[in-house]
Image (cartoon, rainbow, N blue to C red):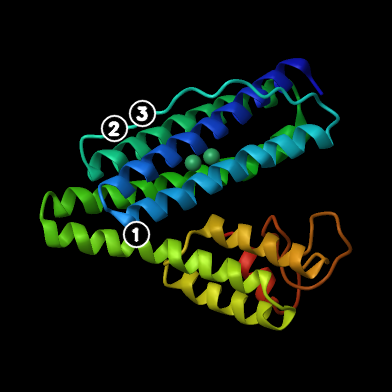
Amino acid sequence: MNATVLSAINEQINSEFAAFYTYLAMSAFCDQQKFLGASKWLRLQSDEERGHALKLFNFVLARDGKVELKAIEQPPAEYESLAAVFEQALKHEQRVTTQINALYELCFTQKAFAEMTELQWFLTEQVEEEKTAREIVAKFRLVNQDPSALLDLDRELAARAVHVQLLRVHVRAERAHLVQAVELFLRLQERREVHLVAARDLAQDVERAQGTPLVQRPGAARGHGEDLHGSATSGPLTPYQRLTRRS
Ligand SMILES: [Fe+2]
Ligand SMILES: [Fe+2]
């Protein structure tokens, strides 16, 4: 691996772990304020960030690079309000987008092609992350300090977390439940009750539970449906392919 690129990716691994830590601290703050829905949502988000760190971690190892885990900065423990937590989350995601863009540019100038492909996932991910955070911030601005509206919003945030956790339980259960779990998840995704990235993570869980790839990998033997990069091939999509299709 190119040394400059490797060092920048190691920085990004640290930054993803820092995000994991920050969202976890935010989750604790919300729990203490008894906004349990927001707390659950943030806990789930923190899991996703840990997933991002591990995705890059695994990538570096697969490229025979040296992973360097660095110290993680102490995250803030106090926020002015519940709304301030999500304002910070949005700002954080915007910073990460800038980082990923810079990293992608570096890979481009260094002709690090495999790394560019890996980072494309993160570019897509950031669009989704910023969009979700922006929508939540907009709702907080709308409800302002109205207590009943705040409680409704907290319940709405709880819904996402509960659905994802329930489905993870399904996935860990017997094989017979897997297809039902995926179908349910698809319906939730259509109703925008779950995050696209959570859907992709779930597909990976399903794959692990099944022990066989359920979605066609790029470069794998040509089949029907659509591969992970969303290039169309002929034939109907399986539930798993629909689940992992990029929208
Ligand atoms: Fe991330
Ligand atoms: Fe993020």
Q: For the residues marked 3 and 1, what is the alpha-carbon distance in whole angstroms?
A: 22 Å
Left or right: residue 173 versus residue 220 is: left
* Element type where label 1 sits in the image: helix
Q: Nearer the viewer, residue 129 or 144?
A: 144
Relative to 112, is 200 on the left or the right? left
Residue 223's x, y, as percent?
83, 70
* Residue furthest top in the image: 4
Q: Nearer the viewer, mark 2 or mark 1?
A: 2
Which residue ends up furthest to the right in the rendered image?
221
Percent coordinates x, y for residue 8 in the rendering: 65, 21
Amino acid type at circle 2 is: Glu
Q: Which residue is mark 1?
A: 157
Say if disc 3 is inside 8 Å of ligand 2: no
The quarter of the picture where residue 118 lies is: top right
- Residue highlighted by disc 3: 76
Which quadrant of the rendered structure holds the N terminus?
A: top right
- Note whether 189 is above or below 13 in the view shown: below
Q: Residues within 10 Å of mark 1 (few under 14, many from 20)?
A: many
Callout 2 environment at 10 Å: few (<14), some (14 to 19), or many (20+)? few
Percent coordinates x, y for residue 198 in the rendering: 55, 58
Answer whether labels 2 and 3 touch (C-beta < 8 Å): yes
Image quadrant where one finds the C terminus = bottom right
How many numbered tags mark residues here?
A: 3
29 to 173, vertically: above or below:
above
Please name the amino acid that badge 1 sits on. Leu
The picture places residue 45, in percent across and down from the top left corner, at: 47, 48
Upstream in sequence: badge 2 or badge 1: 2
Q: Is 117 situated left or right of 46 in this image?
A: right
Which residue in the protein does label 2 denote? Answer: 78
* Residue ID at (16%, 53%): 142
